[in-house]
Amino acid sequence: MATITLKNIPDALYTRLRSKAEEHRRSINREAIVCLETALAGQPVDVESLLAHVREVRNSLGTVFLTDRDLKRARHEGRP
C-alpha cells in the first residue's frame, strides 16, 4: 500500500477529523482514508444523458434573449 503525508492541515480541519475519528472509534489515519473513499466514490456521469437533459430544459425555456445591458443591470442589482 502507498503512503501519503499531508502537510499544513488547518487546525480546525484537523480538530474536526480527530473528533470524527473518536466518534467512529477509528484512528485519525483510518478516518482520513474513509473520508477520501467517500469523497472519491461519486457516480460516473453519463455525459450523453446529462446533455440530453440540458437540451430538454433549454428547449422548454423557449427563446430568451439577454443583452449586455440586461446582464450589467442584473450585476449592478447584486445578482451573480
Image (spheres, helix red, strand yellow):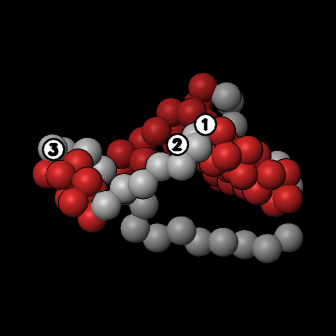
Q: Label 1 crowding class (10 Å Cα cut-off): few <14, some 14-19, many 20+?
A: some
Residue indicated by mark 1: 21
Quadrant where the N terminus is found in the figure: bottom right
* Residue 72 can be seen, yes or no: yes
* Residue 43 point in image, percent of width and height: 82, 49
Residue at far top of view:
23
Q: Name the secondary structure under disc 1.
A: helix
Residue indicated by mark 3: 77
Between residue 60 and residue 21, name the one nearer to us: 60
Q: Label 2 crowding class (10 Å Cα cut-off): few <14, some 14-19, many 20+?
A: some
Kind of residue indicated by mark 3 = Glu
Looking at the image, residue 34 lies above or below residue 5: above
Residue at far left of view:
76
Kind of residue indicated by mark 1 = Ala
Kind of residue indicated by mark 2 = Leu
* Residue 7 point in image, percent of width and height: 46, 70
Q: Is residue 43 left or right of residue 36?
A: right
Between residue 38 and residue 59, name the one nearer to us: 59
**Marks 3,2: beta carbons within 8 A:** no
Q: Name the secondary structure under disc 3.
A: loop
Q: Which mark is in front, 3 or 2? A: 3
Q: Looking at the rendering, which quadrant does residue 66 occupy?
A: bottom left
Residue at 47 percent of width and 49 percent of height: 64
Distance CA(mark 1)–CA(mark 3)? 45 Å
Q: Is residue 8 left or right of residue 31?
A: left
* Residue 50 can be seen, yes or no: no
Residue indicated by mark 2: 17
Looking at the image, residue 9 lies above or below residue 17: below
**Marks 2,1: beta carbons within 8 A:** yes
